[in-house]
Amino acid sequence: MKKLLYIAGALMLLVPALAQAQSLPFVAAETDAASLGTAGANLVQTGSVANASFSNAAAIPFSEQTMDVAAGYTMWQPVSSNILNVGAAFNLKQKFGVAVGFQYGMNPAYDVTNSSGAVTGQFSPSDMHVNVGLAWRFLPFLSLGANVGYATSSLAEGQSYGALAADVFAMAKFGGLKVTAGVANVGTTVKDAAGNEFCIPGSIAVGAGYSKVFGEKNGIDVLVDADYYFSGWMAVAAGAAYTYNDFVSVRVGYRYGGESPVPSYASVGAGVKLLGIKLDAAYLISSSPIGNTLALSLGYTF
């Protein structure tokens, strides 16, 4: 535990002044369909751990699965951005975990003009996020996990910027209750062409989830996450899922985003699982620009 505190403290030294503006906000956005169904309340990973490298690697050793892979497509703000995400997690004897993940965001193209105002072509901005994660369950009820990755955004021809980012979490499980706490998206700063410095949306994050099976076939998960961003923002997400016979699931959730990078929204979702193959979908309801977002995910677990 002391090692975890040392690592977390070292990472927090990278956090710039609270008053600075935020950059690369997409690193704080959830894109996995199963997680979006519960409004992004996914830190304890009650469902799939395929995307643990983008949330909490410490959840992997508590999974009942050996391998979990998934690929998804999110129509974030449907008329504008689309995001492809791929992830995989390997659970070795419920003691060690390894995860990898890749996200690629495709944004609307815009006209490129010369000094005379004539259109000379088009440019399509893009975002990319690559992560790897490791976990160690050193006690039957307690694990540690860390993710390290690189996020980059290309806004114009020859103009792109990126940052290193990391997550460090401790997680405990007591029967059907899971709790976790750590730091998320803490990393290096970003400089624009004018030399102005910006930070990524790092936060102190906590999460909890409770799972219960009734009558052998009816499962209920209740989840809640909270983030306190170093910029002073606060966000809370809560969700619930009902699963019948480990076959079909329905999900609901609500996120209060405040002034954080991801605004407030409600969500509904559903999923089916057969012979290890999983298909999940989520739909976001909001008056903000992220309203009508649709996310789909296909995965395999064993």
Image (cartoon, grey):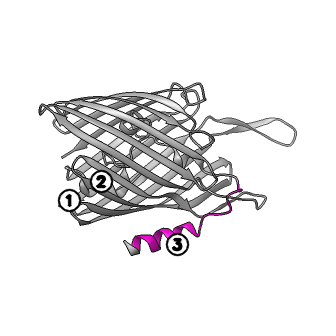
- The magenta-colored residue range is 3-20
Contact, mark 3 vs mark 2 (Cβ under 8 Å): no
Note whether 286 is above or below 144 in the view shown.
Answer: above
Q: Using the numbered discs, state the Cα–Cα distance from disc 2 to disc 1 in whole angstroms.
A: 12 Å
Residue annotated with mark 1: 94
Residue 284 percent across, percent down from the top left: 48, 28
Of residues 200 and 1, the one nearer the viewer is 1
- At horizontal 41% and vertical 70% (from top left) the residue drawn is 4
Of residues 162 and 144, the one nearer the viewer is 144
Q: Which mark is residue 89?
A: 2
* Identity of the residue furthest to the right in this view: 116
Marked residue nearer the N-terminal end (3 or 1): 3
Marked residue nearer the N-terminal end (2 or 1): 2
Q: Secondary structure at mark 1?
A: loop
Contact, mark 3 vs mark 1 (Cβ under 8 Å): no
Q: Using the numbered discs, state the Cα–Cα distance from disc 3 to disc 2 in whole angstroms.
A: 26 Å
Contact, mark 2 vs mark 1 (Cβ under 8 Å): no
**Amino acid at dot 3:** Ala
Residue annotated with mark 3: 10
Note whether 87 is above or below 243 in the view shown.
Answer: below
Residue 7 covered by magenta stretch? yes
Residue 80 percent across, percent down from the top left: 59, 31
Left or right: 63 in relation to 80? left
Residue 96 percent across, percent down from the top left: 25, 64
Left or right: 290 in relation to 274? right
Q: Residues within 10 Å of mark 3 (few under 14, many from 20)?
A: few
- At horizontal 70% and vertical 52% (from top left) the residue drawn is 21
Q: Secondary structure at mark 3?
A: helix
Q: Is residue 123 visible to the viewer in this orientation of the structure?
A: yes
Q: Secondary structure at mark 2?
A: strand
**Amino acid at dot 1:** Gln
